[in-house]
Structure formats: structure tokens, C-alpha cells
Amino acid sequence: MKTTKTMLCGTTIALLVVALVACGTGAPARAVGDLVSVPIFGEWGYEDDSGNAGTSTITFTEVMEDGMPAWHITGNLTRDFVWGGTVWFFELDDKTSELFKSAEAISFMVRTGPGGQRYMMQMQTRVVTDYGHFRVNIDTVEGEAKRLTFPLRHFMQPAWAVPVGRLRPDTITALQWATHDDINPGTYDMTIWDIRLYVPEGTVIPPLAAE
């Protein structure tokens, strides 16, 4: 079941709506080699496995990191549903979807807490229909804030998925994070902030994405 909450510039507006990212961060575009990184925008949401009679839990809380909004995700992963799990996701707005068409990499700040879970990041697209989303595993050190950067070409489908060819950025609809597997039940703890896309210099950047 999808459960979401809305935050605007650090203020909770209403429950059961979603979170606007990069609002008021004051984080401008910045050059990295011949690429420019820009913060991206969209809506946050999360799901547990209760729709399949599972008992995994997830709590999604707005916090502050480095002077900007961040999202702290905690919960407990169980196996009452055979593929038990939770997922937290970031649905792209129209401007960010357009920016993805020329993107070469993505990065975000992350910190994981106690729990011993492994995590992955996934790209949800319009062309994958069997949950075999393009993914990369996330390597973190408990308690350490770290920027992770992944070229989009590094995202691959799992071996069991129906292959749909390479990842096409113009088909991406959402970013997802989840525990790496469902065979290691227990608590999990992750904080994410400052998500950025890397695009070639000279790319036309939607005005809000550069603020």
C-alpha cells in the first residue's frame, strides 16, 4: 500500500500527499569535469508489503542534513510475505524527466544506521513490467555520510528479469531504494539527501532545477 506525506521547504503541508525535493536548498548547478550537476525535483513516497499480508514496516521522516531537507527511512523487514520488503521512491516531475534524457550519471548523499542490511538503488521505467528494474547495489559504512555517484550505464536488470535492452533514460519514471535482498530480515535505517543529475555542459536546464 502506498503511503506518502508532503513537505514544502521543510514544512509538512498534509499527510497522504508527497515530498517536494530540493526546495529551498540553495544548491546551484556545479561543474564536474565536462559535466554539470543539478539538483532534481519530484515527489517522495513509500510502500510496505501489507498489501500481500506482509508485516514489514517503514517510517519516512523529514530531517535536515547539510542545511537542506533530507529523508530518514527506518523500519523492520520481515518474511511473513515470502518476498517481504519495503521500498521508498522518488517520482520524477516533468522537468526532471526532461533533464534525464541527457543525463549521464546520478548521485546522492546517504548515511545508513544500525541494522546490517544491504541496500540497492533502482530505476523504475515504463518498459519493465515484472519488477526486474535496472539496479545497482549500494556500498555504505554504518554512520558515515557519503556521496555515491553512479553512471546510468552501470544500472542493470537482475538475471531473472525479462530483458528489455539497455537502460533508456527517456523511459525513467521514478528512482527507488530498497533493501538489497529479502533473505536477511531485521531493522534498516537510511538517510538520503541532495540527489543530483550529471548532464553535459551546455544542457538546457529547467529554471527550477538550478535554484
Image (cartoon, rainbow, N blue to C red):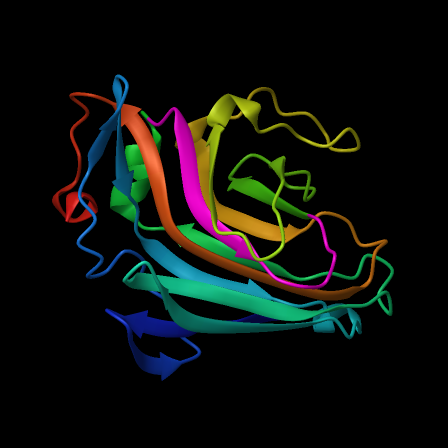
- Image height of 205 relative to 62, above or below: above
The quarter in which the N terminus is drawn is bottom right
**Res 84 visible:** yes
| Residue 190: image location, x then y, percent | 57, 60
| Residue 188: image location, x then y, percent | 68, 63
Q: How many marks?
A: 0
**Res 18 visible:** no
- Taking depth in this image into account, of 2 and 34 the one nearest to the observer is 34
Instruction: Residue at 56% x, 24% y: name it.
Output: 154
Question: In the image, is residue 107 part of the stretch drawn in magenta?
Answer: yes
* Lateral position of residue 90 relative to residue 2, left or right: left
* Lateral position of residue 156 relative to residue 180, left or right: left
Instruction: Residue at 32% x, 58% y: name it.
Output: 66
Instruction: Residue at 71% x, 47% y: name it.
Output: 180
- Image height of 199 relative to 92, above or below: above
Q: Quadrant of residue 202?
A: top left
- Taking depth in this image into account, of 146 and 18 the one nearest to the observer is 146
| Stretch in magenta | 103-118
Task: Name the outermost residue toward the top.
Answer: 34
* Lateral position of residue 159 relative to residue 194, left or right: right
- Taking depth in this image into account, of 69 and 165 the one nearest to the observer is 69
Instruction: Residue at 34% x, 36% y: name it.
Output: 197
| Residue 193: image location, x then y, percent | 40, 55
Question: In the image, is residue 14 part of the stretch drawn in magenta?
Answer: no
- Image height of 176 relative to 64, above or below: above
Q: Quadrant of residue 116?
A: bottom right
| Residue 103: image location, x then y, percent | 35, 27
Task: Name the outermost residue toward the bottom.
Answer: 14
